[in-house]
Image (tube, rainbow, N blue to C red):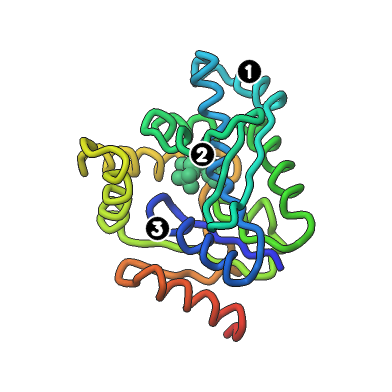
């Protein structure tokens, strides 16, 4: 079974997707982590983030792989190196949407994402899974929450690794990424017509998980 979970940053997609994958014994594919890994490489190689030609070039010669570790966490490898922690740094978050808007970069990631899901047993989370990557997915969900709530959640999450980050900074990042991700020309963030929309503003992660599991068993 292929399960597609899309939605904006901070809506709780990855926490939910990880739990669903574990419960159903499916592979968890965090597609945002792939764009993040490529952004890390671009920054390490000192590539100008507006230099589309160079971004395309590195996307074609970069190896990105994901591994679901037994404890349920996700490990991300860039050219064989574990970059799981590095790709969550604010510098990466700041530029990732600029990298992800390049059509040819998306084509490379699309190929990789389809390859990872080709055995048909995966939960993928991202922005364009239900619309572009797996339009024929067995189940599709669009996870959303009020902007203020998403800022609150993301701020709390980031404080665990960066005690100085402020809510104002998180708000600026989310609003910038929301704008770029949903207005870009290729594969913008959008709810697939046949996706179940879940507003998680007043829900706990466990409630969202239960809602999704119920829909998988009993689609209405
Ligand atoms: O889910 P995330 O915040 O880790 O994703 C990082 C960025 O990657 C996001 O702002 C947009 C981009 N992205 C994308 O364009 N398409 C996807 N399927 C997943 C992520």
Q: Position of residue 9 (x, y in %)?
A: 41, 50
Asked if residue 182 shows in the view, the reply is no
Q: State which tag comes first along the sequence, 3 or 1.
A: 3
Q: Residues within 10 Å of mark 1 (few under 14, many from 20)?
A: few
Relative horizontal placement of residue 106, taking residue 171 as reference (left or right): right
Q: State which tag comes first along the sequence, 2 or 1.
A: 1
Q: Residues within 10 Å of mark 3 (few under 14, many from 20)?
A: many
Find disc 3 in the rendering and name its residue: 11
- The numbered dot on residue 84 is 2
Give the position of the N terminus as an image quadrant: bottom right
Spatial CA span between label 3 and label 2: 20 Å
Above or below, 184 against 154 in this view is above
Residues at circles 2 and 1 in contact by the CB criterion of under 8 Å: no
- The numbered dot on residue 123 is none
What secondary structure is found at the residue carrying circle 2?
Answer: loop
Residue 107 picture quarter = top right
Spatial CA span between label 3 and label 1: 32 Å
Q: Where is residue 61 in the image (x, y as percent from the top left)?
A: 71, 24
What secondary structure is found at the residue carrying circle 3?
Answer: loop
Which dot, 3 or 1, sits closer to the camera? 3
């Amino acid at each position: 079974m292929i399960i597609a979970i899309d939605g904006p940053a901070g809506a709780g997609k990855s926490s939910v997707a990880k739990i669903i994958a574990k419960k159903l014994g499916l592979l968890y594919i965090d597609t945002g982590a792939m764009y993040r890994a490529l952004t890390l490489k671009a920054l390490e190689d000192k590539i100008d983030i507006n230099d589309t030609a160079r971004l395309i070039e590195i996307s074609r010669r970069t190896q990105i792989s994901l591994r679901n570790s037994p404890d349920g966490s996700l490990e991300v490898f860039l050219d064989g190196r574990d970059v799981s922690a590095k790709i969550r740094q604010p510098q990466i978050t700041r530029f990732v949407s600029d990298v992800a808007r390049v059509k040819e970069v998306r084509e490379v990631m699309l190929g990789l994402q389809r390859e990872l899901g080709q055995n048909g047993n995966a939960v993928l989370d991202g922005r364009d899974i239900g619309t572009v990557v797996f339009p024929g997915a067995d189940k599709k969900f669009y996870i959303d929450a009020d902007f203020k709530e998403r800022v609150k959640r993301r701020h709390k999450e980031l404080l665990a690794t960066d005690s100085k980050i402020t809510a104002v900074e998180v708000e600026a990042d989310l609003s910038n990424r929301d704008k770029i991700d949903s207005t870009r020309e290729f594969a913008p963030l959008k709810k697939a017509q046949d996706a179940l929309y879940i507003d998680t503003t007043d829900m706990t992660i466990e409630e969202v998980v239960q809602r999704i599991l119920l829909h998988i068993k009993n689609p209405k």
